[in-house]
Image: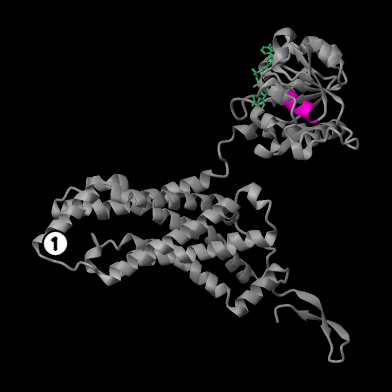
Amino acid sequence: MSRGDMAKPLLGHRNTESDPNTPAAGRTIGVLGSGDFARSLAIRLVCSGFKVVVGSRNPKRKASLFPSAAEVTFQAEAVKKTDVIFVAVFREHYSTLCDLADVLAGKILVDVSNNTEINHHKESNAEYLASLFPACTVVKGFNVVSAWTLQSGARDGNKQVLICSNNQEAKRTVAEIAQVMGFTPVDMGCMSSACEIENIPLRLLPAWKIPIFLSLGLFLCFFTYNLIRQVIHPYIREQKNKLYKIPIEVVNTTLPCVAYVMLSLVYLPGVLAACLQLYYGTKYKRFPDWLDQWLQHRKQIGLLSFFSAALHAVYSLCLPMRRSHRYQLIEMAVKQAVEKKMNIWVEEEVWRMEIYISVGIIALGLLSLLAITSLPSIANSLNWREFSFIQSTLGFIALVISTLHTLTYGWSRAFDENQYKFYLPPTYTLTLLVPCTVILAKVFFNLPCIRQRLVRIRRGWEKGRYVKFVLPSTTGEYSSGETSSNV
Ligand code: NAP
């Protein structure tokens, strides 16, 4: 970012510079350190209407890196000019700030530091800073946003800033500053949460672990199954070397299986939850933990299903590019010429392929829509009904269309004896099991009597509980009484 750019507001739509009602705007904020984070923070603070004073060990050398509106001076000088100081220095260097203890006394220190490992130290960095400066109030915050997010504006990155401190007033002050900068402060309670906040940036895809293992597990199972059918079987039975099929053909028959089964696994926990609610006759009984976890991972499972489906589409488009495909085509053409076969058109096959490809494209289109609308920025722009229509209704339609895609692919192969290699049924018949169960269950739940009961349960009705009811009488007046709600 050039020096000229630094002066431009980063958040055009939320620039609070001129908002006199915001108590935090206009105050002076100190930043200790002149590294990447300090620089981005200073730029953002200036753009949000704050006066910024940067404390550096070498202000002359570092001044040119900061916007001209920010004052860059020695650490002690900077600290004297403000009550709120962001400590943009690594934990290892906190002790070098101890000389400033007197001038820092009574001030708010914002600890923005991160570690390199989860639970690296016994005490959190913020608690360590507080122990070094007992006369200061320490607030943990801003460590979950990167220097890049600070510079590019909250609209391009994570908007939440997690804050904790033992001092409510100091926490409120820092939260106000975060808000003016365009972030959403999240109160994480007292200082004991600092460790948890410091671990957040170090966690690698915590919500994705189970879905990724699930899709890898499915991939391995289907890959092995297809390998046995497409490569090992011809080798053992006919001594034919079909190893060349592994990189593309076997992978391409595996990917749609993963995509299809994963899509059904997005809707299966909903079906199980509905079964439990119908069985217990209440929505107030907790689901088992594994079901809770499964329900929470549906978005990731759906996105991985889309990923596999997209790869399947690309692989399928590349099939005709292979040398093996060309050789096979030429071989077939020569064979037909030798046999003097002129009419090779099989009407049924033509229709099967047309329908198979067409429904495949529609299914992929719907999956793309589901994937896009699950992104927080898009999901936030939808109301609850729009979101549930896309994710629930269109998602279910995508599952039905994917089933048609699978059925038109398999066609009558399930009834062909030759397709049972080593007595193993064609792969597509296996993939149909879970999705068809989900589809049948959904149809069952949509039967008027079942649907009505489910709707009542989800509105708070409970089996066996007596509720007060109010009924309109024939004269138009209302009469009240008590009845068993499951009657
Ligand atoms: P950096 O570029 O290495 O800057 C660290 C700064 O600390 C230096 O520029 C230096 O400024 C100052 N410092 C003060 N005493 C020091 C000493 N004794 N030895 C060395 N440097 C000293 O690091 P950074 O990326 O800005 O990170 C700063 C803090 O922000 C870290 O705690 C980090 O965990 C946290 N953080 C960074 C990011 C990010 O995206 N970079 C994101 C979240 C949190 P002077 O030479 O001017 O004194």
In screen coordinates, is 42 left or right of 438?
Answer: right
Ligand 1 occupies quarter = top right
Residue 225, position as x, y percentages in the image: 31, 54
Q: Quadrant of residue 467?
A: bottom right
Residue hosting label 1: 336
In screen coordinates, is 146 left or right of 22?
Answer: left
x 86%, y 34%: residue: 18
126 above or below 105?
below
Q: Is residue 312 visible?
A: yes
Q: Quadrant of residue 89?
A: top right
Residue 296, position as x, y percentages in the image: 60, 52
56 above or below 5?
above
Looking at the picture, which amino acid does disc 1 mark?
A: Gln
Q: Is residue 230 magenta?
A: no
**Ligand 1 within 8 angstroms of badge 1 C-beta:** no
202 above or below 378?
above
x 14%, y 51%: residue: 239
Residue closest to the eye, 208 or 305: 305
x 40%, y 55%: residue: 256
The magenta segment: 41-48
Q: Is residue 47 magenta?
A: yes
Residue closest to the eye, 141 or 280: 141
Q: Is residue 157 visible?
A: no
